[in-house]
Image (cartoon, rainbow, N blue to C red):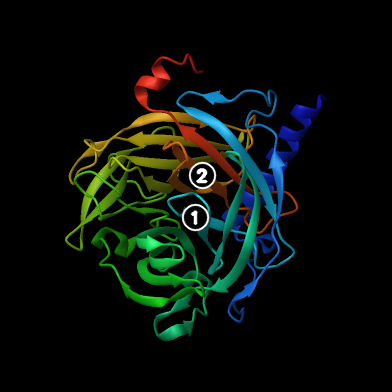
């Protein structure tokens, strides 16, 4: 078997095990007990990814996306993994990520030109409950998305969404790390009777457009009677409903706002016979309104022939030339033997530039 196909086959096997364990709550999927961890620095080893296309590492254009580079991240710390949400500062360097085991990680992304090359100054800490209390139950620690509400990673305000015990909390962040929550947002009434996996895995703060400063979130699996993913925009603190059309049975795993008020939506699908797939959709600022039914534009739809894993986190920042840079990170299901924590970066080209480039 050629090397490229062998790697694809092994990757599918690993994802079968990881996703199968997640679906069945098998012992292999037990998350680390993070109740008693303390804030501490950790070592993160970053291995460069040669190219996004496994069979043609020289390929750089994927529709409107241009490959910048990627890293496979590892750490000896047992609490490292399960990264479900990430946000980067405006310059794409300092970051904070959250895991579904109730851990936050801060650090700095280092670059070689535009290619990510390393993670430095990394440290971990526990996500806490009100009053700086410990989150004792797994269902309370299941953080799935993070967004900067104001300020920066070094000094600012964060929002973190949780999937099982459904809530969106407001946290401070500074050089010491992430504080205990200050308050929680009002939640949509439709989520009161949701199933375990129907939470708001995708959440962001709108950076521009008519809803600048508002929170937007989309349910992962939950579908309405028409088979659409419910989403909400918080208008004056109250969630207002919109719907995202389901295409092909994908789950919604992440969202990030662009400066013009449009919305990037990250999606994932897992099938036993095909492994995992990843899709990226762009919702224009004009489409995103309370009461709207949204389809958006598919920017990328790829499978195991590309360097993906269980992609769940998405962030956007501006490059040094003013370009829009998209960062994706995967949740390895704490199955690091067969899955990976992989960080990917792309440049998102504007419409006119993409149309004239001949990208494919």
* Dot 2: element: strand
Number of numbered callouts drawn: 2
Q: Is residue 232 left or right of residue 204?
A: left
275 or 328: nearer the eye? Answer: 328
Could you tell me residue 113's position as x and y percent? Answer: 60, 39
C-alpha span from label 2 to label 1: 8 Å
Q: Is residue 34 left or right of residue 167?
A: right
First in sequence, mark 2 or 1: give its number.
1
Q: Position of residue 212 (x, y in %)?
A: 24, 50
The crowding category of the residue bearing disc 2, from other C-alpha atoms within 10 Å (few below 14, some 14 to 19, many at least 20), is many
- Viewer-nearest residue: 62 or 35: 62
Q: Is the residue 182 above or below the residue 153 in the image? A: below
Residue 114 locus on image (x, y percent): 57, 38
Quadrant holding the N terminus = top right
Q: Is residue 238 above or below residue 172?
A: above
Q: Which residue is mark 2?
A: 327
In the image, 68 versus 237, the foreground residue is 68
Measured as percent of width and height from the top left, residue 344 is found at 58, 42
Q: Marks 1 and 2: in contact by CB < 8 Å?
A: yes
The secondary structure type at the circle numbered 1 is strand
Residue drawn at 58 percent across, 25 percent down: 60
Q: Is residue 333 left or right of residue 7?
A: left
Instruction: Write down the quadrant of residue 248 in the picture.
Output: top left
Q: Is residue 33 visible?
A: no
Rendered image: mark on residue 86? 1
- Up-down: is 142 above or below 47? below
Residue at 32% of width from left, 43% of height from top?
A: 259
Q: Which mark is residue 45?
A: none
């Amino acid at each position: 078997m050629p090397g490229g196909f062998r790697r694809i086959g092994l990757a599918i096997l690993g994802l079968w095990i990881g996703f199968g364990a997640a679906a069945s709550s098998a012992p292999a999927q037990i998350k680390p007990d993070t109740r008693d961890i303390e804030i501490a620095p950790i070592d993160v080893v970053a291995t460069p990814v040669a190219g996004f296309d496994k069979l043609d590492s020289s390929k750089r254009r994927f529709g409107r996306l241009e490959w910048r580079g990627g890293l496979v991240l590892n750490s000896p710390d047992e609490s490292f993994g399960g990264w479900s949400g990430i946000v980067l500062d405006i310059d794409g360097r300092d970051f904070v990520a959250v895991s579904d085991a109730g851990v936050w990680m801060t650090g700095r992304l280092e670059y070689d030109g535009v290619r990510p090359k390393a993670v430095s100054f990394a440290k971990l800490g526990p996500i806490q409950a009100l009053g700086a209390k410990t989150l004792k139950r797994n269902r309370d620690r299941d953080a799935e998305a993070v967004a900067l509400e104001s300020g920066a990673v070094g000094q600012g305000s964060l929002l973190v969404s949780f999937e099982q015990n459904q809530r969106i909390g407001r946290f401070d962040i500074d050089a010491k790390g992430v504080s205990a929550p200050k308050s929680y947002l009002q939640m949509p009434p439709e989520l009161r009777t949701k199933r375990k996996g129907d939470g708001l895995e995708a959440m962001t703060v709108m950076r521009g457009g008519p809803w600048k400063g508002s929170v937007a979130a989309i349910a992962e699996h939950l579908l309405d009677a028409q088979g659409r993913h419910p989403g909400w925009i918080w208008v004056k603190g109250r969630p207002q409903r919109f719907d995202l059309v389901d295409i092909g049975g994908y789950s919604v795993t992440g969202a990030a706002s662009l400066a013009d008020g449009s919305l990037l939506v990250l999606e994932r699908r897992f099938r036993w016979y095909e492994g995992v797939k990843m899709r990226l959709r762009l919702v224009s600022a004009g489409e995103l309104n309370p009461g709207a039914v949204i389809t958006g534009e598919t920017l990328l739809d790829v499978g195991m022939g590309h360097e993906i894993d269980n992609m769940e986190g998405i962030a956007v920042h501006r490059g040094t030339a003013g370009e829009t840079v998209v960062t994706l990170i995967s949740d390895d299901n704490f199955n690091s033997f067969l899955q990976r924590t992989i960080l990917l970066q792309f440049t998102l080209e504007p419409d006119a530039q993409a149309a004239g480039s001949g990208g494919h």
